[in-house]
Image (cartoon, rainbow, N blue to C red):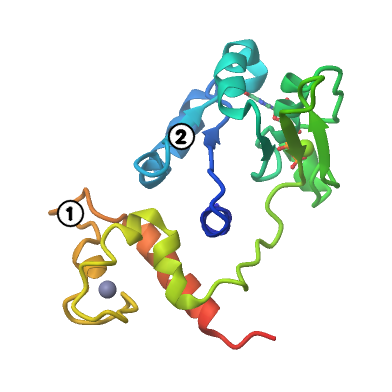
Amino acid sequence: MARALIAAEAERIQPIIALNKSDLVEPFERAWAKLAPYRRMHHGVLPLSLKASGEADYASLMKLLAGKSTLVLGPSGSGKSTLTNLLVPGATVLTQEISQALNSGKHTTTSTTWYWIDEARTTGLIDSPGFQEFGLNHIAPMQLAGLMPDIAEHANDCKFYNCTHLHEPGCGVIANVASAAAPEGISASRYKIYGELFAELSQKRY
Ligand SMILES: Nc1nc2c(ncn2[C@@H]2O[C@H](COP(=O)(O)OP(=O)(O)OP(=O)(O)O)[C@@H](O)[C@H]2O)c(=O)[nH]1
Ligand SMILES: [Mg+2]
Ligand SMILES: [Zn+2]
């Protein structure tokens, strides 16, 4: 998910983050807690219950999607095709229990399809097999911090203008990584993702 958000940011695409299956209370709460750094970014995380009470989600979704075309990304079984079936009149995309999808080692949806939600064709929805390898090869390592809003917020407070935020003294990012004493900072997991991606993007690639 971090990779897809960075790619969106690089293209100035407004992301919407949603967490589905709020009817499955316990696993939902665990996933919701893990999304804490993302709830503080962008425009928060939208809780959904597409199968159990999709009609209740319909209006808020349409408000966010109207007049735009939206690519739906997410892991297998998260409900991307269920969303398509809810929003696109007449759509009957195959959906499947996650266990079956995972047993076959494949996504239920195997190709990417563009649907129009309205007759006037102003609102589009693109169902996809989800996250495959989300390549970020077009992004330079020194661009990365600027594309991660929680990191970017502190990336101008560094002593060195060419700070990589990995080890430099006087780094505003490092100084703001959350700790037990200051839990409100950049989450440790997000800072770890930054370091891993920086290393990946720094490798020569042809
Ligand atoms: N409990 C619960 N199940 C849901 C909800 N929304 C979808 N599901 C179920 O989750 C399973 C997977 O849904 P899909 O829509 O096929 O998931 P997908 O993201 O399209 O999966 P892939 O095509 O494999 O990438 C199906 O059995 C759905 O009925 C929900 O809000 N609550
Ligand atoms: Mg699908
Ligand atoms: Zn720095």
Answer yes or no: is residue 63 visible: yes
Tell me the residue at 32%/81% (across/down).
162
Compared across the picture, whether 24 is left or right of 183 comes to: right
Find residue 90 and report its horizontal and vertical position in percent. 86, 18
Tell me the residue at 53%/33% (across/down).
19
**Residue 33 numbered mark, or none:** none
Answer yes or no: is residue 49 visible: no
Label 2 with label 1: CB-CB less than 8 Å: no
**Residue 180 numbered mark, or none:** 1
Amino acid on which the number 1 mark rests in the picture: Ala
Tell me the residue at 79%/27% (across/down).
121
Compared across the picture, whether 161 is left or right of 57 comes to: left
Mark 2 Cα-neighbour bin, 10 Å: few <14, some 14–19, many ≥20: some
Compared across the picture, whether 60 is left or right of 177 comes to: right
Q: Is residue 64 above or below residue 127?
A: above
Find residue 92 and report its horizontal and vertical position in percent. 87, 23
Could you say which is closer to the camera, residue 102 or residue 131?
131
Quarter of the rendering containing residue 115: top right
Q: Is residue 120 above or below residue 167?
A: above
Q: Is residue 53 above or below residue 95?
A: above
- Element carrying mark 1: loop
Could you say which is closer to the camera, residue 158 or residue 200?
158
Find residue 125 and report its horizontal and vertical position in percent. 73, 34
Q: Which residue is mark 2?
A: 45
Mark 1 Cα-neighbour bin, 10 Å: few <14, some 14–19, many ≥20: few
